[in-house]
Image: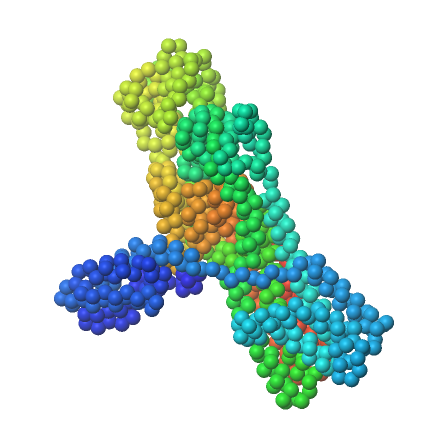
Amino acid sequence: MLHKESQKDWMKCHIMHSLTGRVRFRVTGLAFLHDSMKELADELAGLPGVVKAQVTPCTESVLLCFDPKQADTDTLTEQVDLIFARYAMPAMRALHASNKEDVAEQPMTTAKLAKRLAVNAGALVLGNTLFTAPLLAGAAANFTSLEALASLGLTMPMIRSAWDGLKKDHRPNADFLTVTSIVASLMLGNAHSALMILALSDLAELMTSYTIERTRSSIKKMLSADDGDVWKIANDGQLVKTPIGQVSIGDTIAVHTGEKIAVDGVVVFGSAVVDQSAITGEFVPAEKHEEDEVFAGTVVKNGNIHVQASKVGDQTVVSRIVGMVEASELKKAPIQRYADKFSNYLVPLNFLLCLSVWLVTKNPQKALKMLVIDYSCGIKLSTATAFSAAINTAVKRGVLIKGGTFIEQMSNANTVLLDKTGTITEGKPRVLSMVTLTDDMDEKEILSYAMAAEETSTHPLASAILGYGRSIGAEIPAHGEVVTEVSRGSRTDVNGKIVRVGNMKYMQENGVKTRKNIPDAQGAIPNYVGIDNRIVAVLFAMDSPRENVRRAINALRYDGVGDIELLTGDMEAQARAVADQVGVDGFRAQLLPEQKAEAVLKLQTRGNGVVMVGDGINDAPALAYADVGISLGSKSTDIAMETSDIIINRDDPMMIPELRHLARATMRIVQQNFAMVIGINTVGLILGAASGISVMMSALLHNASTILVVANSLRLMFFPPMERS
C-alpha cells in the first residue's frame, strides 16, 4: 500500500518550490481526492491572503498564489495541513478501493503432479528398457523417442503459460526459460536430462501444492462447525425445529431465553432483554419490543420473541467466510509480487549468458546449462510454501489468516489498537468494592437486601452483585415480585421495605437520597442500594480485563510494537481505568464505529502499520480499514469475522504476540530462501560456464536448491508456540 511503502505523512504538504507570493506544495494523498478537487480548491482559495488556488490530483500538487503582505509560506503550510487532515478518511477509503492486489496463479493439485511424476518415471524406465528406438530417423530422432515425447507432453502446460506471458507482458517468463531449456536438451539429444529437469521441478511444486492443500483442509475443518437449528414458526402456528440453512427471508423464528438470535430481522411478537455487546461494545443489555430491530449473534437474556428474518443464509453463516478465505489465499503478499518481478527480470539474463557462453566457448552443452539454471522457480515456490505453511500452523492453533499479505503486514506493523469490551475485557463485570452509607446495617445485611432485588434479573451487573453477595455468605431473604426498569435498575419489597438497586438516576427519580459523601468511582460502575427513601450503600463494579492481557501487551512491546492504544465506545472513566490496568500507551473513549475507523486511517496517513483487534459489529469499520484487522474471541460476530483479516477463535490475548512471532519468523525464512536461491544458482551458473559438469548435474544443482528452500519453508509447519512461563 502507498502509505506503507512511502513511510511518510502522505496527507501533509511538502514545499516543492516557492517564490515571493507563490508556493507549490506536494501532497501524496491528493492523488486519491479527484472527487473532492473543487471543494478543496474552494477551501484553499478562502485562506487569508490567498488570491488563487490550483489543485492538480494527477501531479499531487497544490499551487497557491498569495499576497505577501497578508500571508507567508510557513503560515500557509500549517493551514493547508489542517485542511488536508480533514480529507484523510475519504482519501484512505479511495486508496483501499483502488488497491486491488495481484492474484496468484492457481497451482496444480497434488494428484495431478503425482500423475505427472508417474508418467515421467514410466517414460524414464520404459525408454531405457523396452522402447529405446525412436519412432523416426534422422533429425527427428531426438524428438520421437519415448523420453522425448513424454518430455514434450509434460511441457505443454508450461508452453501455454510461456505464450500467455509473452502476450500479456511482452517478455519471456520463467516458464519460457524452462521450455527453451527442454527443447534445447532434446535438440542436443539429452532427452534423459529433459525428463530429469521436469521431474525435479514437479517434485518441488508437489511439496508446495501439498502444503497449500493441507492448509485449505485445515481452514475448512476449522470453519465447518454446525450452524445449529432454530425454532421456525410454521403456517399453522406450530414450532418446527429447522436448520439455520433452511430459513428464508420472511420466515418467522421463535427465540427463547438463553438462545442466540440466528438472523437479522424485526421483532413481530413479544419482548425480551437482549445482550448486544457484540454490536454496541456495551455489556448493558437492551430491551426489545415489537418493531424493534435485532441482529444475528446477539443473545436473548430474558424473555421470548418472534423475529421475522430479513437477512439469512449466506449473509450470516460461516460458509461465506470459507469462500472468502479461499479466494483471498490466492492474493499475493507484497514480497511475493516483488519475488515474481525480480525473478522475471532475471530471465533475460539467462538468455544473455547462454549467448555469451556459446560465443566464447562454441560449446552448445555449456550454453544449455545457462538455460537450465534459473532463479525463478526457487524464489516463487519457496515464498508461496512459506506463507501457506505459516497459515496452516496458525489454523492448527485456532487462528485463521486470510492470505500471505497479512503475514507480511503483521510482521511490519508498529501500532496496535485494541477494542475494550469483549476483546481485552471479559464483558462480565465484577464487584470490586462496597461502601456502606449507614451505621445501623452491616455489609452482609445490606447485600442480602440487594440480592433480593436482583435475584431474577439477567443484567450483568445483577449477576455481579449476586456473585459478590454469595462470596461473603449473604443469603437472599423472602421478598415480593422483582420489577425491572430498563436502563435504571430493579426493585422489590422485603418485610414491607422497598428495596431498589440501580443507578443514581433511578434513585433520584424515586426520591431516594443520602446526606453522606459518596466516594469517586475511579472508573468503576457505581450501583446504589436504596431502602425506602435513603441510599444505604454503593457497590462498585468493573468489567475485568482478560487473563494475560497485560502479558500480551508487554510481549508485543518487546517484539517491536511502538504504540499500543485502547479504543472503546465506553465512558472515559471506565476506559481510563482499564487502560491503567493493562498498561497501554493511551486510550480514546466514547467512540462511534465511524470514529474508530477514522482513528485507524489517521494513524495510517502518518506512515504507521496499524493492527486493529476487535470482536463486534461496532469494530467492523476499523477492522476493515486497518492494515491487519484481527477478530479476537470465540464469540466474535460474523461481520467482525468477515471484515477482519485474521480470526483468532480463542479467548486468549497471548495469541496476538504469538501471531506476530510467527509472522516475523515467516519473513525471516523468506529472506533466507532468497539468499539460498541466489547463492546456489549463481554458483551453478559459474560452474556451468567454467567447468565441465554435465547438463544433468546443472539441472540437479538448480532443482536441489529449489527443493532445499521449499523444505526450509516447510519448517514453519512445525513452528513451536511461544513459551508462556
Position of 437 relative to 423 (above/below): above
Position of 305 relative to 594 (above/below): above
Question: In what quadrant of the picture does the N terminus appear?
Answer: bottom left
Q: Quadrant of residue 670?
A: bottom right
Q: Quadrant of residue 539?
A: top left
Q: Residue at x 48, y 20 (%)?
A: 473
Q: Residue at x 25, y 66 (%)?
A: 54
Residue sticking out furthest to the front:
235
Question: In what quadrant of the picture does the C terminus appear?
Answer: top right
The x, y position of residue 267, in whole percent, is 44, 30
Left/right placement of residue 558 relative to residue 725 reads left
The x, y position of residue 311, in whole percent, is 48, 39
Q: Residue at x 50, y 51 (%)?
A: 645
Left/right placement of residue 33 relative to residue 102 reads left
The x, y position of residue 182, in whole percent, is 69, 75
Q: Quadrant of residue 707?
A: bottom right
Can residue 678 be seen here? The reply is: no
The chosen color scheme is rainbow
319 and 510: which one is in front?
Answer: 319
Position of 619 relative to 156 (above/below): above
Q: Residue at x 36, y 45 (%)?
A: 588
